[in-house]
Image (cartoon, rainbow, N blue to C red):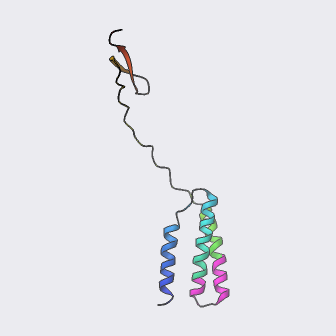
Amino acid sequence: MHKSLPFAALVVSSLALAGCGYTPEQRATSGAALGGATGAALGAATGGGVGAALAGGALGAATGAIVGANTRPPPPPPPAYYPPPAPPPARCARWGYDPYGNPVCTGYYGY
């Protein structure tokens, strides 16, 4: 029981941090750190001593770096939709629209 609570905390924290980073270098670095920590914890939990923890950490770091570098970042959010701007409070008698959908005054009062 003493080893399962820290291991569960480590697994939960590594899942929360697994998606960090947007460049391949950042994802490889975070993957190596999370994989190394998880591998060392698993090696130590098996009771194989310091050698098992070091081997687990090295294998976990290498695997995490490879997997992290070969993943894709999340797609960018879609562009926000903004309604066309309101016509300016000019003395415009007739409104039209340009090719981009923006309101354009095509005739003025008193001219």
- Residue at screen point 51% across, 82% down: 7
- Left or right of 53 in this view: 80: left
- The magenta segment: 42-58
Q: In which quarter of the image is residue 53?
A: bottom right
**Residue 6: x, y in percent?**
50, 83
- For the C terminus, the image quarter is top left
**Residue 55: x, y in percent?**
67, 81
- Residue at screen point 61% across, 80% down: 40
Q: In which quarter of the image is residue 103?
A: top left
Magenta-colored stretch includes residue 37: no
19 up-or-down from 48: above or below:
above
- Residue at screen point 39% across, 38% down: 82
Magenta-colored stretch includes residue 46: yes
35 up-or-down from 74: above or below:
below
- Left or right of 44 in this view: 12: left
**Residue 8: x, y in percent?**
48, 80
88 up-or-down from 17: above or below:
above
12 up-or-down from 50: above or below:
above
The number of callouts visible is 0
Q: State the residue lying farthest toward the top.
A: 111
- Left or right of 94 in this view: 62: right
Q: Is the magenta stretch mostly helix, strand or loop?
A: helix
